Image (cartoon, rainbow, N blue to C red):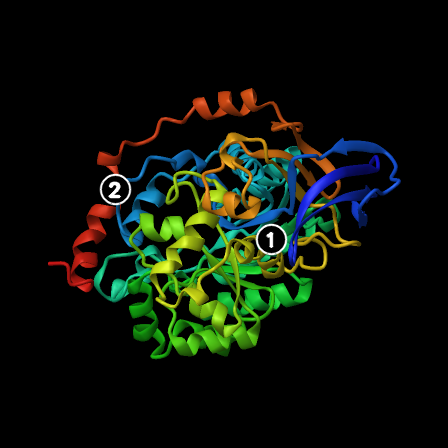
Amino acid sequence: MSDTLIRGALIPVEDGYTTTDIQISAGKIVAIAPNLPGTGIEVNAASKLLLPGFLNGHTHSSQAWQRGLIPPLPLELWLADGFDTSASEIEQIYWGAVSTAVDTVLSGGTCVLDHLFLPLGHEMEAIAAAVQAYKTVGIRAVIAPLIMDLPFVAGLPQGRRSLTHKPYPQAAPEILAWMAAIITQFHEPEAGIYIGVGPTGFHRCSDELLVRCAELSDRHNLCRHTHLLETKAQFMLAQERYGISAVKHLQNLGFLDHRTTLAHSVWLEDADLEILADTKSTVVHNPLSNLRLGSGIAPILKCIAAGVNVAFGCDGAASNDGQDLLEAIKLGTILHNLTDRDYTHWITPRQAIAMAAMGGATGVNLAAQTGSLTVGKDADFVLYDLENLSMLPRTDPVQLLVYGRPNQVVDSVWVKGRAIVAKGKLLTLDIEELRQALRQTRDQQSPTNFRTIHTIEPHYRTIMNLD
């Protein structure tokens, strides 16, 4: 890997901005200072803003094929449609991961956490496809296979008592066996590929599965990732099943620690915040899908005030029909101006980019490697074009990036010191090849032919007092 000198980039500092050079060697930042002598390839970064790469802290890459497919529905009904139309072909898994990686990179991300849905019986092939996709694009990726051992109806209050169902086809021991094999074969930190442990959530996982996932995470020092209290129905289910909050139950199981990331966390109570802060768990804020599904507004300002680490996520393309990380950061920043009248508590643009970069890296246990412009860390960063029309007139670049509507503003991207985008063009993949693959959409069912929703909708409407 050639040394690279980035010359004359604008970076934010405590009292404003400064222009500096950054030297990359062996994939790492080795110097940050003006007028470095430098070696290797020289990149002119005049009129460019340099920021650490952001982390897309929660998505489901295989949902790329469901973009624009599922109508407006709350999560529990949306999930029924989602399962009916999930990608099942290995080629779809590959191109879904490629599409997600490309969207993330071109919107400022250098790392993605993929809570990947795996076709039953084809787990190893699906992981292999996703790994190959992320290596091809060159993005850093944490792949957390989405696992569960309870049937779909278990995720609904009174579901197993009131709805016809069959046991889930795989039990915890079988699931953990192939998870262990996936870790052995595919966990490659040196290549920027990390396997995480991804139980879907307490609502569809037994305590045995959650405990053994935590043990697996501890044994191999892996991130563990799960959905948490995304909807009011899940809040009700936790009370029904445990008689205590879902957060307290996860703490009792030993599931919460500094490697734990919790997607959504919309229906948290004040007592939960103290637990999350004490255990150093991370909340991943997914504002777009939370609104798309009517789930609610997560108490992010309360999380920040309590000392909880917060990251941003796009969620999958079936519940956020785009994968634009800058869009998620913007909405996740300004949305909370409505949740607290005291404007001194609002998230500033600089706080937002720190949450997107260092907050995300901390959540996936990679804060020592990435998340900030620091000598000794891996060279994961992005140059934004300040001459782009959406970044003019030149006022406050970070504020324009977060509050504005940046359009094709990413100029260059490096991951582990490797250039994967230059002058706005992806270097590692022919975009036309991706375009052709996405055109060849499988013969999907139309929204009017979804199956499962019709069997659970009356029950859902009853438990939520909608009739």
**Res. 205 in view:** no
Q: Marks 2 and 1: which is nearer the front? A: 1
Image spot of residue 239 (x, y percent): 32, 74
Q: Tell me the residue at 32%/59% (across/down).
A: 296
Q: Quadrant of residue 335?
A: bottom left
**Residue linked to disc 2:** 451
Question: Disc 2 and disc 1: Cα gap in Å?
Answer: 40 Å
- Per the image, label 1 sits on a secondary structure element best described as helix
CA neighbours of label 2 inside 10 A, class few (<14), some (14 to 19), many (20+): some
- Contact? badges 2 and 1 (CB < 8 Å): no
Quarter of the rendering occupied by the N terminus: top right
- Per the image, label 2 sits on a secondary structure element best described as loop
Image height of 252 relative to 359, above or below: below
**Amino acid type, residue under disc 2 in the picture:** Arg
Q: Tell me the residue at 48%/72% (across/down).
A: 305
Image height of 319 relative to 169, above or below: above
Image spot of residue 429 (x, y percent): 63, 26
* Residue 3 falls left or right of residue 462: right
Q: Tell me the residue at 49%/37% (across/down).
A: 406
Instruction: Please state which of residues 334 and 310 is positioned toward the viewer in this rendering.
Output: 334
